[in-house]
Image (cartoon, helix red, strand yellow):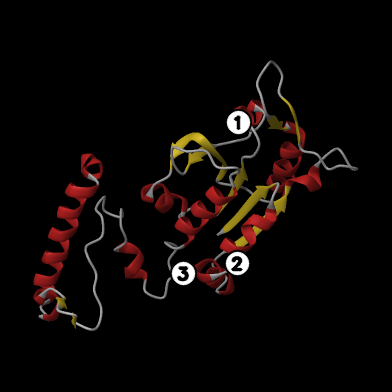
Amino acid sequence: MRIDIITVLPELLDGPLNHSILKRAQDKGLLSLHVHNLREYSTDLKHRRVDDYAFGFSAGMVMQIEPIDRIISQLKSERDYDEVIYTSPDGETFNQGMANQLSLKENFIILCGHYKGIDYRIREHLITKEISVGDYVLTGGELAAAIITDAVVRVIPGVLSDEQSALSDCFQDNLLAPPVYTRPADYKGWKVPDILLSGHQRNIEEWEHQQALERTKRLRPDLLKD
């Protein structure tokens, strides 16, 4: 998989994208990750500005259409892309199902929103999918892009050493995960449930499913509607 991320603040992505699971995916050759500084495509060679005042009476600055069109056009001239994603508070809410779907793609671009947003013509003509990571506003789309990338890449076969681990994560089957425990089995009198120590796989799996269902009903009943 190849992911291209377009941003005005590439330094914000260095930590999240170059450590842990994402670094491992790149080292294994399962992920090709490229971060592009939008300012390098500015028509203002002196100040490298990529924003301007909005038409009308709206407050705040707007990302210009030309630098974004230039970089997306260049990338698309080099290869085909399955999606051109824009991180936006009014996009479709990101969830595990969407992460699973995106993990099946070969190449996609993520454009990180910034300032007051992007010239709307970009959304009309260049963007194929808009994604929000929640009902709140971030300073920029870089953190959202990191979240999307992490969630997508970790379910690509071969990225995790134990692939079953990703399949049993929260939300994979619209259920929260059951409680998990490790050694010691008894700490200060706080004991691990006996069934987990029984070694009986079927009974343990049934217990885990019931626990996941109970926790979902109690904490996230909205998930059961789907």
Q: Are marks 1 and 3 in contact (CB under 8 Å)?
A: no
x and y percentages locating residue 72 in the rendered image: 69, 42
Question: Is the residue marked by circle 2 packed among few (<14), some (14-19), or many (20+) residues within 10 Å?
Answer: some
Three-letter code, disc 3: Val
Q: Mark 3 points at which residue?
A: 159
Q: Disc 3 on helix, strand or loop? A: loop
Direction from residue 14 to residue 45 in the image, left or right: right
Direction from residue 2 to residue 165 in the image, left or right: left
Question: Is the residue marked by circle 1 packed among few (<14), some (14-19), or many (20+) residues within 10 Å?
Answer: some
Three-letter code, disc 2: Asn
Q: Mark 2 points at which residue?
A: 18
| Disc on the earlier residue, 3 or 2 | 2
State which mark lies toward you, 3 or 2: 2
Front-most of residues 109 and 44: 44
Q: Mark 1 points at which residue?
A: 123
Direction from residue 49 to residue 31 in the image, left or right: left
Direction from residue 144 to residue 156 in the image, left or right: left
x and y percentages locating residue 207 in the rendered image: 12, 65
Residues at marks 1 and 2, CA–CA distance in whole angstroms: 29 Å
x and y percentages locating residue 216 in the rendered image: 21, 51
Q: Are marks 1 and 2 in contact (CB under 8 Å)?
A: no
Q: Quadrant of residue 135?
A: top left
Residues at marks 1 and 3, CA–CA distance in whole angstroms: 32 Å
Q: Quadrant of the N terminus?
A: bottom right
Residue drawn at (63%, 51%) of the image: 5
Three-letter code, disc 1: Arg
